[in-house]
Structure formats: structure tokens, C-alpha cells
Image (cartoon, rainbow, N blue to C red):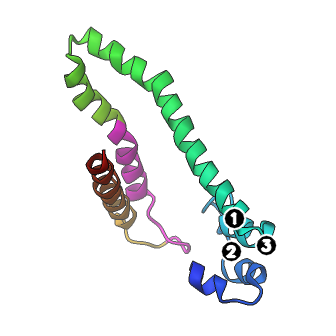
Amino acid sequence: PCSGATINEQPNRCSYVTRMCPNDEGESLVDYRQFHYCTMDGWPAVSITALVGVVVLTFYVLGETAEEYFCPVVRKIADNWNLAPSTAGVTLLALGNGAPDVFASLAAFTGATGVDGAGEVGTGMIGAIVSAGMFVSGGGVGAVAIV
């Protein structure tokens, strides 16, 4: 009921989003549907530009943080272990890149409970692993193919 096509068919999109698409506790820090359909109602181009700007800013901050904090540590470890830069790149950078996925999978595995406290252990972990793999396969390989 909260797809873009369904929302756009409604006569009063803001009330529909508020009523039918609530932002669950802990789901997101910002309710982007509320922002797009209520706060910025009447200015969809400005809303989309702002949201794309947030995504671009996020990637910029991620790149700057990796350059400032992650790369120097990898260089230092590679120097201490007498690793060639290419070897450090394919091992240490891959380890650092995959570590958040490992910890997210472990967290999903140990805390996979439903709203009522019941749930199947491991279902969240499988979703996290599959979604990360699909992103790497689709996004990463696609970007390499374009370049």
C-alpha cells in the first residue's frame, strides 16, 4: 500500500502517507515519505533534488572518512607486515570492507525476533547476506563494467 504508484493515485497524498505508511519506531531516523509527500508537497522537483543531494553528501562523507581514517591504518599495517601495496589492497581493504557485513549478520542472527518476541533465528541474517551480495554483484560489477 506504500508504493509510489499507489500513493500518487490518492487525492490527498499527505493524509494517505500519514495514515497508511507510518514510520515504525527504529525503522528510520527520517520519514522520507512524509518529507516528500507532506513537507514538500507541491515541490516534487525540490524534494527529489534535496533527497539526491543527501545521498551524494553521504557518499562524499563516507569517502572522506575512509581516506582520512581507514587508508592510513591500512598503510601502517601493510608497512609493519611488509606487504606489497597490491597485496594489502586485496586483503586488508577487503577485510575492512566486509567486517560490517559480518557483524550485521551476527547481530541479525542473535536478535531475530518478531514484534511479539517470537521469530525464526537466522532469517534476518540470510536477508542481510543476500542483500549485501546482490548490491556487490549488481552495483560493484556494474560500476566496474561502466568504467
- Is residue 84 or residue 81 the one in the foreground? 84
- Three-letter amino acid code of the residue under disc 3: Gly
Are the residues at dot 3 and dot 2 in contact (C-beta closer than 8 Å)?
no
Residue drawn at x 60%, y 86% is 6
Amino acid carrying label 2: it is Pro
Prevailing SS of the magenta stretch: helix
Q: Quadrant of the N terminus?
A: bottom right
Q: 19 or 5: nearer the eye?
A: 5
Can residue 25 be seen?
yes
Q: Is residue 26 left or right of residue 96?
A: right
- Crowd band around label 1 with a 10 angstrom C-alpha radius: few (<14), some (14–19), many (20+): few
Does the magenta segment cover residue 107? yes
Please say whether residue 29 is visible from this viewpoint. Answer: no
Any mark on residue 22, and which? 2
Local SS, label 3: loop
Mark 1 vs mark 2: give the one in front: 1
**Labels 3 & 1 near each other (Cβ < 8 A):** no
Looking at the rendering, the stretch of residues picked out in magenta corresponds to 97-117
Residue, disc 3: 42
The x and y percentages for residue 104 are 41, 50
Q: Is residue 119 left or right of residue 17?
A: left
Query: In the image, what residue occupies the spot 68% across and 58% down?
Result: 30
Residue neighbourhood size for the residue with mark 3, other residues' Cα within 10 Å, grouped as few (<14), some (14–19), many (≥20): few
On the image, numbered disc 1 is attached to which residue? Answer: 45
Identify the element where label 2 is drawn: loop
Q: Label 3 to label 2, Cα distance in Å? A: 21 Å
Binning the other alpha carbons within 10 Å of mark 2 as few (below 14), some (14 to 19) or many (20 upward) gives: some
